[in-house]
Amino acid sequence: MKYMVMICRGHVPKWHGMNSDSSKFLTYFLPKGGKLDTETAQWIARSLHLSFKGMDSGEVYDILMQQFLVAAAKYDPDYTRKIKKVAECIDHELSKCKQVRVVDANRHLEFDCDRHLRFLARKHFLQAVKGKDGKIAGWERTGSWPKASALKGEPIACGY
């Protein structure tokens, strides 16, 4: 409900009384390297308000629910296990390859691992190698490549 107040009214109701969920929500909209304080929280709330300008709270709620359903459809409860399997595949089956291609990894795994390789690249464990056309042709391990046993994590449940 506090999100709706921020979006519909365009301001943060109470900075010092703001709960941790609201502050986490606002940090998603911070510029890179920005710090959440009163001024930036107000700026983000005004920006959200302008994004939904002229809409009533019911319309805003419907749009936010539609976006949530799109995100929830992509949810994979086995994502962390798949990341570990991709790392194990790179460590064992593809250890002799200098460059890992998605098709090579897919050949050893029973799922499409493109998004898992991209995740490992975001965490700086892999580095993209671009082809002549400018598209990603494969992935190379970086110096911070972890052992597969170091990739610990449990599935994240989706709350009701």
Image: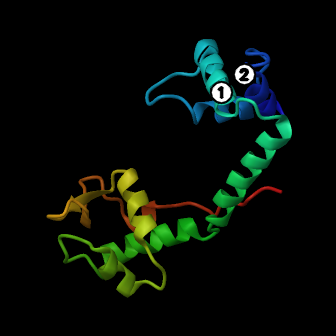
- Quarter-of-image position of residue 153: bottom right
Residue 4 in view: yes
Outermost front residue: 54
Which residue is labeled 1 in the image? 50
Q: Do the residues bearing badges 1 and 2 touch, measured as CB atoms within 8 Å?
A: yes
- Quarter-of-image position of residue 36: top right
Quarter of the figure with the N terminus: top right
Quarter of the figure with the C terminus: bottom right
**Type of amino acid under label 1:** Leu
Q: In percent of the image, x 48 and y 28: which residue is there?
A: 31
Q: In percent of the image, x 68 and y 52: which residue is there?
A: 67
How far from the left and from the top, in percent, is residue 64? 73, 46
Mark 1 and mark 2: span between their CA atoms? Answer: 8 Å
Q: In percent of the image, x 85 and y 41: which residue is there?
A: 58
Give the label on residue 137, or none: none
Q: Is residue 49 left or right of residue 29?
A: right
How far from the left and from the top, in percent, is residue 108? 38, 86
